[in-house]
């Protein structure tokens, strides 16, 4: 008993030591490599003699703030639907994203803005780092409740590197367009997390089944996450596009797509629900699929109708996925997908990539005019035909699926290292393992917050 | 029993079928009519050879995002104060607004941006569509808890058309100024909803009385809605004004007006409260009246003092309305106004319209200088005197009240169609009729979430 | 009994009367003194013949909205962690800030934008007024739960004047740089509140001890506050800086600093926690210390590494403060610091001021280039050396601590005026004293919401 308590406390040291180690290493790398860029350095900016109103800050920062809200409020609260895992959902989202954005700044910086031995940072690197953090949080959704925070940090350590590599392959080497990240963020994050969850398969997870559901107020907290993701998704998809019409069009497209996925989600949820009743899980998640599905094609000339059609399809597929495919995923494929990321990010991400293939293949000089240069520079300067661009887009999807799957497998093996602190099957989806939970030792203690296994810490 | 169950399930099909029908019809109309405008179309934007920094996106989109937050987070959570109706408040807000914004894009597009057989869309149409969705949600507030989602969609179908018509009459034909919508949004939405609620009067609603109140945490969720509405209202009123000083001044005015309505709401709430205690209903609602009351005059030269005085008055009137007039409205006028929209949007909206009459009537070339052209173009180019503009403003209020009232009556008759699924008197304010509610079949089931009428679904 | 009830009701009149008095006085002062500035006045703006896109609105308003969100959502919900004080935390934040921003507009206006007998207002005055409101809310945090709303309004009345005076002394007379307010906002607000709390020391506060903790969902509400503060802090620190690189760099710096303070907070919280478990109090508060600590130096050339190091240190110090120093503060220094503002704003504010001394002292023409004029105008035009600037910064910290401490003492004496309504020792941290609390007289009444002292209102 005392022995196991000592071991438990010893394992608990993994989180603080890993935090300190990772933060220390990141800080040293920042000291050596990271510098202000031309838009954030006092001397460089003023040397350029440019008007302050031209600073990229004014064109990107409002979008960045919306993305930042989505990452920390959106993902955090969306995952707080679990009745006893709200502290962990919001708290570990906070921790993971705070680390991932620093590490992504380094990894993406080496790939994209490494000049003269230095990485140069500004609002664009902030947006990209937050995007990478979003992918990590998508993967987190697949394993929510079944891993400890130290495991999660290690996952982020690996995933950010692979995310950066995949992003570099697609955007820089293959010339693939994917502004809102249907491939690089959603498909990558989902399949990385799903394969990882497969490797971590827990055959006796039913021991924690009573905690896998929501309670009334936890569902309302989750809706805070959902709605913030929904309202700011137009900013997400448009944050890194070319300025002017590109950013404007992408936001508009996403707005329409999301509104259609909301209607199809309500329709299908009621159709497949018992007594025609709506299911909060569908509304909280599938209604967002419209944002995922236009991640690639949103900046292209998808047309408003195309946005509605894509959103409608994505909401439908996603809701059906929650209803019919998630159970199969567990029973047949042994993938325990806590938040259903396969339905919200996986399938809509792949659909979005394929939609991008289609819309890229239809690109003409007539439709895009001089704007072709912004959206498809390689077509505009004659290096590629539209069909060739479409093929590259398709190959990009393939590359993403490969890297995500192999990476998720590696991640799973990493997280299974025997000395890592992980919750037992009966401790899953339980805040109390990692947090001081109020009400525990007081009269006000609420039944649902009490663990029925006081011996787990003994 | 089995018969009634079958009928109940049959009625539940109304929501999904209506969603699919409306989304399908909207998508077809989009395919035929809706096109990117000059600011969102790749070819058109680049053909114009304009600087990307001139794209309207950068001047309107941050405001749009605040408006979007108000519509989906603000209204949704504000209405979640009911103890057992949080899923419906947030969820139906989500559904209704997602449909209304698409439908409004079409209706407003036909009235305002129909050129060459096409509707042209961009950030301005997004703002206007969200404004229209806000009016629909105001009407929703009057009948909250007493209608099914299929009824609500039908209401939106009708109301959006009438909203668009009224807006066109006022802004385009009558040359009325109403940037923040004291008339077109608040007065219209409130009286449409109130008359509709009158037609749907339920004499035996006391059967659901035990669910009409809040619980502690539902009031805190509602405060999330309140505060987001309050902080972003300056963006709401200023989102569609002329650029430059107009947008800037409107935001400033609204900021002051809201701060004064907050103080008067706290003062009056404590004065009329039992033992001098504050009432959450007042704070959640009346404190916002300062935003409504400067909806028309905010872009005019109201002066900072005028903003404080207007806000103070609006908060006072609104709080007194909640305390003394809402009970009379039900007992004498048979209007059951769930959220008190008469106090938050009706009276302050009318006050705001009258304030607009006053401030427009006082307009001089001296006060506005060359800015007169932006605020009162018809006065600036000599077509109207300030007095004439004031009379037109007043007539605009009259038109709004007429269309809203007649429209609300029609809406009520529409929603009373006997085959439409509506909750019974004892099912009002209850999520469980339309949602799978957690805790229902588990040990963790909370008393307040259980319906005491298990036979209602039988 | 009846006598004490009458007296209680009489005391309750203090809040409404004070609200009416303060709002009336403010409105009169606005009528006499406050005018639109060149950017918000129709005639003045158009007379200048400037492009609408040059209006300061477009450069400052998005930042303002983020600051506004922090003040009303951030502070309000962060303080809602108390199990029975959520209405008061959110509601009194709302009231206090709504008053403080009006009063601050006047006080700061007299100091900073008083020309020709008038105060001129626009988005900059809105940002500054919200900053002042933030300082008042920081002080509120130190006395949360132990004062009535009328006392709080009086505190704001005094504190805003002293805040304005201190700000004027530092920024205008001493030429100190403090864009994000490490000194003027955080240090000032914290020590004003702490000294005030000392004067209001309640030796028998253990009577309310059972209400001083959180419950599960109140901690989640508090996390809404935390995360909104965290994500928008880059906007807070950069809102009032010079445009262009200054605003951009400050946002970037704050972003990094916060991410590092998050990691160090998680690390230290787990290290010092029982069984290695994390404490929500630390995560909710200390993770934000990274924003406070770069409030002065964020606009300077701190470097990204410097931001990480500063944030790391601040998170560590703040967490250790919560764990080890807060108890001592109460037992030894008789300061009952409800929210631990000494740990979140006090120590990190002083650290931030000292960091500003250091970074200012290291300023060179080489590092800042022509940007030196924006960041350190007095060094740029040769009036001061970098060392002299550093000394002025240090003196600014000293002045701030003096004014805050003396002011807090005065404030405490003011709030102890015997006729002022204050909760008794057993009524602290209890909404029911000031609010109609739902569930009180109904079957749905929740145990934790019931007061066990029904006689307190008798």
Image (cartoon, coloured by chain):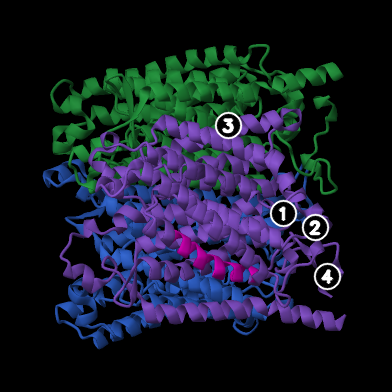
Chain colours: A blue, B purple, C green
Query: Same subunit under labels 2 and 3?
Result: yes
Which numbered disc flags the more N-terminal residue, 3 or 1?
Answer: 3
CB atoms of marks 2 and 1 within 8 Å:
yes
Q: Around disc 1, counting alpha carbons within 10 Å, would you say few (fewer than 14), some (14 to 19), or many (20 or more)?
A: many
Which numbered disc flags the more N-terminal residue, 3 or 4?
Answer: 3
Q: Mark 4: which secondary structure?
A: helix
Vertical relation: C50 (above or below) B75: above
Q: Mark 3: which secondary structure?
A: helix
| Chain containing mark 1 | B
Which numbered disc flags the more N-terminal residue, 4 or 1?
Answer: 1
The location of residue C308, given as percent across then percent down, is: 37, 43
Q: Around disc 2, counting alpha carbons within 10 Å, would you say few (fewer than 14), some (14 to 19), or many (20 or more)?
A: some
What residue range appears in magenta?
B151-167
Q: Which mark is residue B336?
A: 1
Residue A72 relative to residue C84: left or right: left
Residue at position x 37%, y 59% from top?
B172
Q: Quadrant of residue C416?
A: top right
């Amino acid at each position: 008993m005392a022995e196991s308590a000592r071991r438990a406390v010893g394992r608990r040291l993994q989180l603080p030591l890993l935090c300190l180690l990772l933060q220390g290493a990141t800080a040293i790398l920042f000291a050596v490599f990271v510098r202000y860029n031309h838009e954030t350095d006092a001397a460089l900016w003023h040397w350029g003699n440019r008007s302050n109103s031209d600073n990229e800050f004014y064109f990107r920062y409002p979008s960045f703030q919306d993305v930042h809200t989505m990452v920390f409020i959106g993902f955090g609260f969306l995952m707080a639907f679990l009745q006893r895992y709200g502290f962990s959902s919001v708290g570990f989202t906070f921790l993971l994203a705070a680390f991932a954005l620093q590490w992504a700044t380094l990894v993406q910086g080496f790939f994209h803005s490494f000049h003269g031995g230095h990485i140069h940072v500004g609002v664009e690197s902030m947006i990209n780092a937050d995007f990478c953090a979003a992918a990590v949080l998508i993967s987190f959704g697949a394993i929510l409740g079944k891993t400890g925070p130290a495991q999660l940090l290690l996952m982020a350590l690996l995933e950010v590197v692979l995310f950066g590599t995949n992003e570099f392959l697609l955007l820089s080497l293959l010339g693939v367009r994917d502004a809102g990240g249907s491939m690089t963020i959603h498909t990558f994050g989902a399949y990385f997390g799903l394969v990882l969850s497969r490797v971590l398969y827990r055959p006796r997870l039913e021991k924690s089944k009573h905690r896998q559901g929501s309670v009334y107020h936890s569902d309302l907290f989750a809706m805070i996450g959902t709605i913030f993701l929904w309202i700011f998704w137009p900013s997400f998809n448009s944050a890194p596009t070319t300025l002017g019409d590109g950013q404007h069009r992408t936001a508009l497209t996403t707005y329409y797509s999301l509104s259609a996925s909301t209607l199809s989600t309500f329709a299908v949820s009621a159709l497949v629900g018992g007594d025609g009743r709506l299911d909060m899980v569908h509304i909280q998640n599938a209604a967002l699929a419209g944002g995922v599905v236009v991640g690639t094609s949103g900046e292209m000339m998808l047309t408003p109708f195309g946005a509605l059609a894509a959103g409608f399809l994505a909401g439908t597929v996603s809701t059906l996925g929650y209803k019919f495919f998630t159970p199969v995923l567990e029973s047949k494929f042994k993938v325990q997908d806590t938040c259903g990321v396969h339905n919200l990010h996986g399938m809509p991400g792949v659909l979005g990539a394929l939609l991008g293939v289609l819309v890229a293949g239809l690109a003409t000089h007539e439709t895009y005019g001089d704007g072709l240069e912004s959206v498809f520079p390689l077509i505009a300067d004659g290096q590629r035909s539209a069909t060739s661009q479409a093929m590259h887009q398709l190959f990009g999807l393939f590359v993403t699926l490969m890297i995500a799957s192999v990476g998720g497998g590696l991640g799973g093996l990493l997280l299974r290292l025997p000395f890592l602190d992980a919750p037992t099957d009966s401790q899953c989806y339980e805040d109390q393992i990692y947090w001081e939970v109020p009400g525990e030792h007081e009269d006000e203690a609420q039944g649902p917050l009490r663990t029925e296994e006081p011996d787990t810490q003994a």
